[in-house]
Image (cartoon, helix red, strand yellow):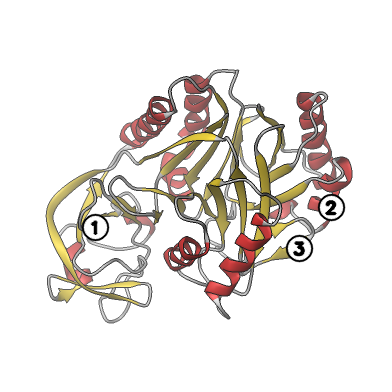
Amino acid sequence: MLKMAVGHSDDVEPKDAIAEAIEQCRASLGEAIPQAAILFSTFDAFDTWVPAAIREAFPGIAVMGTTSGAEMSSVGGYREDSVTLATFASDEVDITVGLGSGLTDDLDAACRAAVEQAMAGTSKEPKVCVMVTEPYIVEPQHTLQAMRRALPEGVVLVGGASGRSDFSAVTPTYQFVNETVVDNGFAIMLFSGPVVFSTSVGTGWKTIGPRGTVTRSENGSLNEVDGKPAVEFVKRYLDEIGPATYGNPLAVFEQGTDDFYLRAIPTVTEDGSLPVGTIPIGAEVQLTTADTDAILSGTRDALREARERFPAGAKPEAALLFSCAIRKFLLGTQTKVEAELAQSAFGTAVPLVGLYCFGEVGPIEGADASRFLNETFVTLLLGT
């Protein structure tokens, strides 16, 4: 058994909001005693006392989480400026947490510390790791690579980057485990033992125009495509770069992979580089396009694939969703449809919780490990 109880409130008073979410979880848990919890909170409602309030309500519980761009759940649907709490109870699966901080000091040491903290709470085999990370201080893909070195072989990494509801103010964001809160780290939740799961990644974007080959990419930027400044590649189609071009992210095709992932194009530097994150040399890139219907079609595809990939004979008992703040920006008033589609896809028997991130984390078909993604809808289904 794996039971996830969900609480969700957008009460204007932060203390009342978290109290309401706690009571909703308590009512859903019944006699079950939760091991761990995830909290996704609007930036304005979060403070260090919030995890403490959860731990007071559920003695012995381990809490991890982050600030978010918006929140969604099976209790409240899609909401902005809210808090969403998911508590986990199981008599078979161990659910443990860890915190890494000081990413600019020693990235590998931070990842090892977080994994060791989470592993200390279990003697069972870890299967899946949920991660929420700071998106700007250190390039998230570098953090993922360090996490891969720290985690045991075969653990699947899924999650997202911390966010804020104010899209123009990207920092600071908070990551926390229990009462320890940082703005330069990441938090993880490790599921170990007889847990079964499926993941899916959906976008909705379609490629347009020719592909180019990455010939230089370093320091978090795509510098050259086909031996020329990267901006020349995108300027064939885009008159300006910034929020107006969020609807045209770059598709990245790494060598040997079966699918592409997306990187948003936020701006251009003086030397013609695009600060989209480091992309492997030799990968191919291509511009993309999508309208509202296509974006929501990507959501449907991700939800359907997660159900189809779930192990035969097992039943999903929880769903974690990670969608991009840029999807929210582009969908506008239709953003709520993503939560509605998830509720329709999984039904009332599967509780769900999710957030809007400043980037997502998920596995790509044919890739050896998870990648940092933009403008993507990532689904994780869990069960026993």
Rate crowding at label 1 as few (under 14), some (14 to 19) or many (20 or more) other CA atoms within 10 Å. many
Q: Residue at x 79, y 28 (%)?
A: 32
Image coordinates of residue 297 in percent, x first then y, are 34, 31
Disc sitting over residue 52 in the figure: 2
State left or right for residue 295 relative to residue 176.
Answer: left
- Quarter-of-image position of residue 236: bottom left
Disc sitting over residue 89 in the figure: none
Mark nearer the N terminus (2 vs 3): 2
Callouts 2 and 1 close, C-beta under 8 Å: no
Callouts 2 and 3 close, C-beta under 8 Å: no
Q: Residue at x 73, y 49 (%)?
A: 63
Residue flagged by tag 3: what amino acid is it?
Thr
- Quarter-of-image position of residue 200: top left
Residue flagged by tag 1: what amino acid is it?
Glu
Can you identify the residue that label 3 sits on?
A: 180
Q: Report, in whole angstroms, how far the alpha carbon at label 2 lies from the one at label 1.
A: 43 Å
Mark nearer the N terminus (1 vs 3): 3
Q: Report, in whole angstroms, how far the alpha carbon at label 1 lies from the one at label 3.
A: 37 Å
Q: Nearer the viewer, residue 360 or 34?
A: 34
Residue 162 visible, this orientation:
no
Element class at badge 3: strand
Callouts 1 and 3 close, C-beta under 8 Å: no
Image coordinates of residue 334 in percent, x first then y, are 46, 33
Can you identify the residue that label 1 sits on?
A: 254
Q: Report, in whole angstroms, how far the alpha carbon at label 2 lies from the one at label 3.
A: 10 Å
- When the figure is inspected, residue 154 is found, relative to residue 72, above or below; the finding is below
Element class at badge 2: helix
